[in-house]
């Protein structure tokens, strides 16, 4: 069923689909039954019920799992609705299918699971039973309604876990470039910071508290009408930290296609599953646009920048990302390796 057309301001850059675009893109969606070949699944957007389709997928082919299931809220996703349940029921629901998706991951794979404060506790309990939980990232969602009798809800969680102690983490790829608030000098020279024409900045190691993200809104070209869209910058951090070019990224709750679009921009293979056909078509359109424009807002010159530094960021000179050929044996990434596994 088509989404009703909204009246938008002339400068609104929200990405939409015309009826003609949707008709064409709909024919290119992959639909059940799914092939068993990793080659045929590469760089595909599947329209279908991910929980029903997980058993059809090949085992141990995923390097990085991005898991953004419905939060434990009453929420409308296109033609589909998720109903809030008790925390115990949400935990049971998550447990009912999580082991199935784990079977698709390599022993060296990493996974990130998104949640809000209502679902985060249940997610952690399930993860702790099956994988090695390594950290909880909390990121500031600056949007949100105020509350008169409670604290404003302005943050979300992302749980970071691995299958074993042999995994990839590229810390230098996700450092944040921040303004220097107290520029310390040693022998007259900047210490641990740079003094340039654009200002005084230093590179900082990534922490588990993220305050540099902007939730997509009407003036950003990545914005869609999806109610829970994640920023491309957020997904880029996850992909750059925990995968290498040619690695396979899987997102079984693809939504408007942020994971697929960012994977294309960063040279990763991907597979995404989305139940709503409109959003699945939108995801395909975003992948196509990524071929011509691989830029990611807030990521420039190979670095992540804090908010409100656009004038200081280098202009993007990234080449167009061609469709990625299947790499049967991608180059091995730098890995954190220890002897003990879980």
Image (cartoon, rainbow, N blue to C red):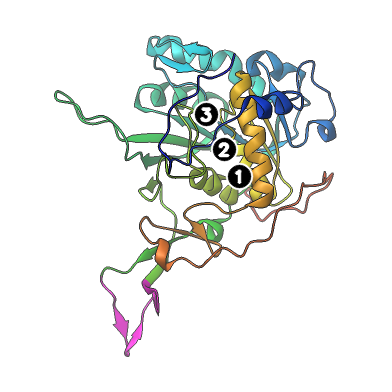
Residue depicted at 53% across the width and 43% down the height: 235
Residue placed under numbered mark 1 in the picture: 262
Q: Is residue 216 left or right of residue 112?
A: left
Residue placed under numbered mark 2 in the picture: 258
Vertical relation: 56 (above or below) 9: above
Residue depicted at 65% across the width and 36% down the height: 285
Upstream in the sequence, badge 3 or badge 2? 3
Mark 3 and mark 1: Cα distance apart in space: 15 Å
The stretch in magenta equals: 182-200
- Judged from the image, the secondary structure of the residue bearing numbered disc 2 is helix
Q: Quadrant of the C terminus?
A: top right
| Category of crowding for the residue at label 2, using alpha-carbon neighbours closer than 10 angstroms: few (below 14), some (14–19), many (at least 20) | many
Mark 2 and mark 1: Cα distance apart in space: 6 Å
Residue depicted at 59% across the width and 34% down the height: 257
Q: Is residue 99 left or right of residue 124?
A: right
| Category of crowding for the residue at label 3, using alpha-carbon neighbours closer than 10 angstroms: few (below 14), some (14–19), many (at least 20) | some
Instruction: Answer whether labels 2 and 1 touch (C-beta < 8 Å).
Output: yes
């Amino acid at each position: 069923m088509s989404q009703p057309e909204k009246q938008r301001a002339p400068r609104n850059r929200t990405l939409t689909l015309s009826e003609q675009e949707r008709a064409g893109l709909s024919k290119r969606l992959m639909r059940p039954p799914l092939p068993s070949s990793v080659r045929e699944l590469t760089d595909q957007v599947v329209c279908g019920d991910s929980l029903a389709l997980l058993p059809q997928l090949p085992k141990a082919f995923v390097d990085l799992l991005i898991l953004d299931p419905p939060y434990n809220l009453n929420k409308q996703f296109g033609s589909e609705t998720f109903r809030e349940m008790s925390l115990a029921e949400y935990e049971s629901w998550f447990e009912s299918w999580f082991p199935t998706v784990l079977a698709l991951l390599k022993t060296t794979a990493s996974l990130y699971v998104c949640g809000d404060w209502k679902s985060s506790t249940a997610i952690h309990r399930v993860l702790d039973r099956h994988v090695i939980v390594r950290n909880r990232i909390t990121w500031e969602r600056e949007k949100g309604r105020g509350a008169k009798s409670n604290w404003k809800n302005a943050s979300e969680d992302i749980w970071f876990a691995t299958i074993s102690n042999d995994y990839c983490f590229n810390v230098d790829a996700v450092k944040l470039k921040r303004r220097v608030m107290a520029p310390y000098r040693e022998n007259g020279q900047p210490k641990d910071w740079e003094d340039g024409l654009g200002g005084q900045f230093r590179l900082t190691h990534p922490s588990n508290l993220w305050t540099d993200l902007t939730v997509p809104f009407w003036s950003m070209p990545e914005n869609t009408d999806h109610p829970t869209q994640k920023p491309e910058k957020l997904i880029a951090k996850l992909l750059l930290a925990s995968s290498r070019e040619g690695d396979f990224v899987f997102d079984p709750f693809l939504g408007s296609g942020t994971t697929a679009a960012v994977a294309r921009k960063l040279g990763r293979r991907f597979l995404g599953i989305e139940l709503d056909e409109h959003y699945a078509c939108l995801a395909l359109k975003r992948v196509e646009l990524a071929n011509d424009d691989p830029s990611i807002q807030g990521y420039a010159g190979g670095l992540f920048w804090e908010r409100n530094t656009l004038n200081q960021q280098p202009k993007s000179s990234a080449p167009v990302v061609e469709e990625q050929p299947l790499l049967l044996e991608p180059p091995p990434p730098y890995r954190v390796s220890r002897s003990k596994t879980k």
